[in-house]
Amino acid sequence: MDITKAKVIVTGGSSGLGAATAAEFRARGADVTIFDLNPKGAAVAEAMGASFAAVDVTDETSVASALKAASDTMGGLTGAVSCAGIATAERTLGRFGPHALSSFRKTISINLTGSFNIARLSAEIMAKNDGDDENGVIINTASVAAFDGQKGQTAYAASKGGVAALSLPLARDLATMKIRAMAIAPGIFRTPMLESLGREVMDGLAADVVHPKRLGLPQEFARLAAFIYESPYLNGTTIRLDGALRMP
């Protein structure tokens, strides 16, 4: 698809991978609307010439109304990139008892259910497009934790494993509407959350990366998202973006 004519929503676009993705699409000429619950997303969007909507990805009404407004503002919808998510660290059975069911449910709700909510409601709008070969692209964010989750990552790994598993059935479901579905599974990326842990921690994490020996840059995630959007034969799978990292 022609990215210069793209009309894209990016969830979790107030910072990190989402903000970088929104900026990359804008730099290439796309119309972009950032969806985020963080109010600072409005300033991030304004700085790059994008629009902003306060959206709870787990809420059907919130997403449906925001998608309609974004589509009206941009003159359509051709892409949806889901970057909204949370990371939890809790063992199945720890010093203080079993993993809290509430935190497991919350992680699944935001990371997995939220991504599907965006995908299904975006597809409804994209299906009304009249493209010769393509009507839309859905890109979800999985994680290497989907394949080699570490201790304390049962909730997070399960949610991202579900995101990865969505790619193929979504692509099959939406094929007749000429909508593609993909996912990116990033490794350890230099986001504001990681930077807050300090240089020593970041260097320790980077040591496990095979090559290049560093953390991933949000711009690298963004460039892959843009490449997926522009590549019509990429469909129904999850791409690892991790410098050959395999979590120990």
Image: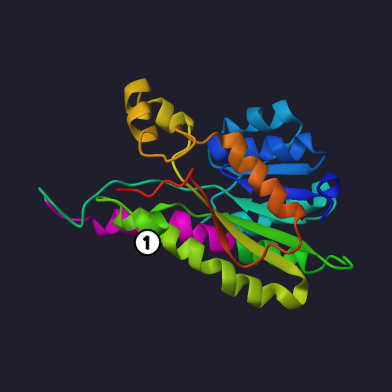
Q: For residue 21, which quarter of the picture?
A: top right
Q: For this view, does 213 lie left or right of residue 183?
A: left
Q: Is residue 203 left or right of residue 3?
A: left
Question: Can residue 59 be seen by looking at this rendering?
Answer: no
Q: Is residue 100 magenta?
A: yes
| Kind of residue indicated by mark 1 | Ala
- Residue 26 placement (x, y as % from top left): 76, 37
The quadrant in which residue 176 appears is: bottom right
Secondary structure of residue under mark 1 = helix
Q: Which residues, given as a range, are shown in magenta? A: 97-118
In the depicted structure, whether residue 8 falls above or below residue 215 = below
At 45% from the left and 65% from the top, the residue drawn is 162
Rendered view: 83 above or below 129: above
Q: Please identify the quarter of the rendering in which residue 27 is found.
A: top right
Q: Residues within 10 Å of mark 1 (few under 14, many from 20)?
A: many
What is the x, y in percent for residue 199? 37, 21
Q: Which residue is mark 1?
A: 158
- Which residue is found at the position 10% from the left and 48% from the top? 95
Q: Is residue 188 magenta?
A: no
Nearest the eye: 210 or 236:
210
Callout count: 1
* Residue with the most extreme top position: 199
Residue 222: x, y in percent?
Answer: 64, 41
- Give the main secondary structure, helix, strand or loop, of the magenta stretch: helix
Q: Is residue 151 left or right of residue 207?
A: left
Seen as rendered, the residue at the extreme front is 211
